[in-house]
Image (cartoon, rainbow, N blue to C red):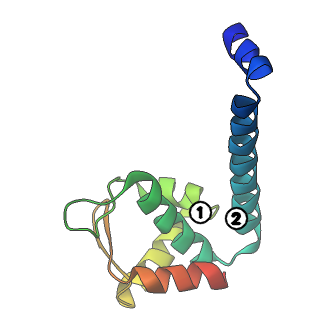
Amino acid sequence: MEAVKQLIRENHDVAIFFIRQLSSHLGNADERTVNLTQKHVRGRLAEALLTLKDNYGVEDDGQTLGIRLRREELASLSNMTTSNAIRTLSQFTDEGLIATDGRRIRLLREHELHRISELG
């Protein structure tokens, strides 16, 4: 840690890099907190699915999330009860937005999920 502190003191470009990175992470955390507390259930779940895609990618088919989560874990990520997460996943499936197979979730109409997430 001392070596990092010295590097920051001696190289202002490194200091600015760290400040920008921290600012970006703080801004993202603040936005996520606001979204989890102010969006409706559908918007929160849509955002969680899109965030999982961004963070874990997709399988070779280009649609299936690269991570497997239990419904309880997905509910926790979306700041909702498990029953609300299951009900909303079923609605998304019925609307043709996603397809599920156990813990596998395939995003069929990603642009619609973006719209739902934005509308909250």
Which residue does the image show at 56% across and 69% down from the upper left? 47
Q: Residues within 10 Å of mark 1 (few under 14, many from 20)?
A: many
Please identify the quarter of the rendering in which residue 91 is found: bottom left
- As rendered, which of 37 and 7 lies closer to the eye? 7
State whether residue 84 appears in this view: no
Q: Residues within 10 Å of mark 2 (few under 14, many from 20)?
A: many
- Provide the secondary structure element on which disc 2 rests: helix
Where is residue 40? Give x, y as percent: 67, 78
Using residue 26 as the reference point, say whether residue 84 is left or right of it.
left
Q: Quadrant of the N terminus?
A: top right
**Residue denoted by label 1:** 78
Q: Mark on residue 64?
A: none
> Callout 2, which amino acid?
Leu
Farthest left residue in view = 60
Which residue does the image show at 36% across and 82% down from the upper left? 93
Q: Quadrant of the C terminus?
A: bottom right
Q: Is residue 12 above or below residue 73?
A: above
Where is residue 111? Give x, y as percent: 45, 84
Residues at marks 2 and 1 touching, judged by CB atoms closer than 8 Å: yes
Using residue 66 as the reference point, say whether residue 112 is left or right of it.
right
Q: Is residue 68 above or below residue 87?
A: above
> Callout 1, which amino acid?
Ser
Farthest bottom residue in view = 95
- As rendered, which of 108 and 54 lies closer to the eye? 54
Tell me the distance, in whole angstroms, between the alpha carbons under discs 2 and 1: 7 Å
Please identify the quarter of the rendering in which residue 5 is found: top right
- Provide the secondary structure element on which disc 1 rests: loop
**Residue denoted by label 2:** 36
